[in-house]
């Protein structure tokens, strides 16, 4: 352990221990991808036994140290930990599962600790590069031993911007393509690696000048959001407000570029309300054209056939 990491907050040290343990599981599995068991949670939304094993070791590590803390994890939701604790660990055991399945080495482990809804500790670990991004609220953000600062670029025309494509049923690709075009014509370049937690860290490190995406969940953005703000950046929704964690839209960047991105993205904002969530669920449950064709081609059976409802979130 380095001198910098020796002085870390105890809770952050436990999170780092958990992230590295998950990273070891992921690295071992990456050596034999052919042996992976892959399940589909929803169209284009995959989960592997590696996601589940990594999540299990993270939860066991955290709860062995802090048994009275709550857990919000991508694969198991809130079924572990204390249900009403003021401390909640927000976990994505493998962000970038689709990349992982294909052997594309761009994925990470993301762990954040929120106290009364405010993120206090954050770790994002890239096991393929052994890169550890971490932050404690009020104490700065780091990559390994290096203090992170967002980029100093001030002109949007010089900016490199990260994004993520909508890919789940219920997402609105047409809306995204209009937004993508609006951004693309104003900046130097747009990139889409496919792991949002890592993308947010790239903003903190100054590799990107900004990042935006729709359809993200709290476990995708919780850790990266603190790492960005501790590196001097800003993060919010498309209208520049700080309420982004449950909005399913996020914009992050250096202050100067962030300020120029808000007017571009604001027309595309979609503040999530209960009726929107209900509409999303209805869209997710609706069969695709391919499913309808397949169903009509099947031999008829007695009784009604109920379509299985999938989760678009």
Image (spheres, rainbow, N blue to C red):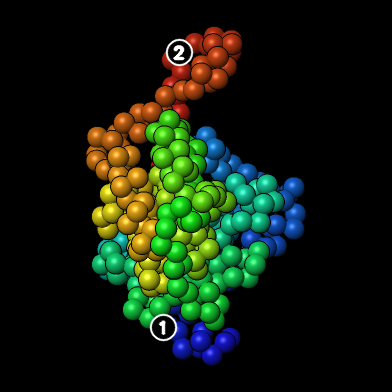
Q: Is residue 75 above or below residue 226?
A: above
The span from disc 1 to disc 2 (Cα, nearest Å) is 60 Å
Residue 43 point in image, percent of width and height: 52, 34
Q: Which residue is mark 1?
A: 9
- Badge 1 marks a residue whose secondary structure is loop
Occupied quadrant, residue 211: bottom left
**Contact (Cβ within 8 Å) of mark 1 with mark 2:** no
Residue 77 visible in the current orientation: no
Q: Is residue 210 above or below residue 273?
A: below
Q: Is residue 272 above or below residue 138?
A: above
Q: Quadrant of the N terminus?
A: bottom right
Q: Which residue is mark 2?
A: 303
- Say which residue appears at 36% left-offset and 51% top-offset: 261
Residue 212 point in image, percent of width and height: 42, 50
257 or 89: nearer the eye?
Answer: 257
- Badge 2 marks a residue whose secondary structure is loop
- Say which residue appears at 74% left-offset and 47% top-offset: 34
Residue 138 visible in the current orientation: yes
Occupied quadrant, residue 310: top left
Q: Nearer the viewer, mark 1 or mark 2?
A: 1
The crowding category of the residue bearing disc 1, from other C-alpha atoms within 10 Å (few below 14, some 14 to 19, many at least 20), is some
45 or 4: nearer the eye?
Answer: 4
Residue 271 point in image, percent of width and height: 27, 43
The crowding category of the residue bearing disc 2, from other C-alpha atoms within 10 Å (few below 14, some 14 to 19, many at least 20), is few
């Amino acid at each position: 352990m380095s001198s910098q990491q020796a002085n870390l907050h105890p809770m952050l040290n436990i999170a780092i221990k958990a992230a590295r343990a998950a990273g070891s599981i992921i690295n071992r599995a990456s050596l034999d991808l052919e042996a992976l068991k892959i399940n589909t949670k929803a169209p284009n939304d995959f989960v592997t036994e590696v996601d589940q094993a990594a999540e299990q070791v993270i939860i066991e590590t955290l709860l062995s140290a802090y048994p009275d803390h709550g857990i919000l994890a991508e694969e198991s939701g809130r079924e572990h930990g204390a249900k009403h604790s003021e401390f909640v660990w927000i976990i994505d055991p493998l962000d970038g599962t689709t990349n992982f399945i294909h052997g594309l080495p761009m994925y990470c482990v993301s762990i954040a600790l929120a106290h009364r809804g405010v993120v206090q500790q954050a770790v994002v670990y890239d096991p393929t590069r052994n890169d550890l991004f971490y932050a404690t609220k009020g104490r700065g953000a780091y990559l390994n031993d290096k203090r992170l600062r967002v980029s100093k670029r001030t002109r949007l025309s010089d900016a490199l911007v990260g994004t993520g494509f909508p890919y789940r049923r219920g997402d609105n690709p047409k809306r995204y393509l209009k937004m993508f075009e609006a951004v693309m014509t104003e900046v130097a370049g747009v990139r889409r690696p496919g792991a949002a937690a890592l993308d947010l860290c790239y903003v903190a490190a100054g590799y990107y000048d900004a990042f935006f995406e729709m359809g993200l969940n709290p476990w995708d953005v919780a850790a990266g959001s603190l790492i960005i703000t501790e590196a001097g950046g800003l993060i919010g929704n498309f209208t520049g407000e700080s309420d982004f964690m449950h909005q399913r839209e996020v914009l992050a960047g250096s202050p100067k570029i962030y300020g120029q991105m808000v007017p571009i993205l604001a027309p595309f904002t979609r503040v999530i309300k209960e009726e929107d969530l209900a509409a999303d669920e209805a869209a997710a449950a609706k069969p695709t054209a391919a499913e309808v064709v397949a169903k009509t081609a099947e031999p008829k059976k007695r009784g009604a056939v109920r379509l299985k409802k999938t989760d678009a979130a």
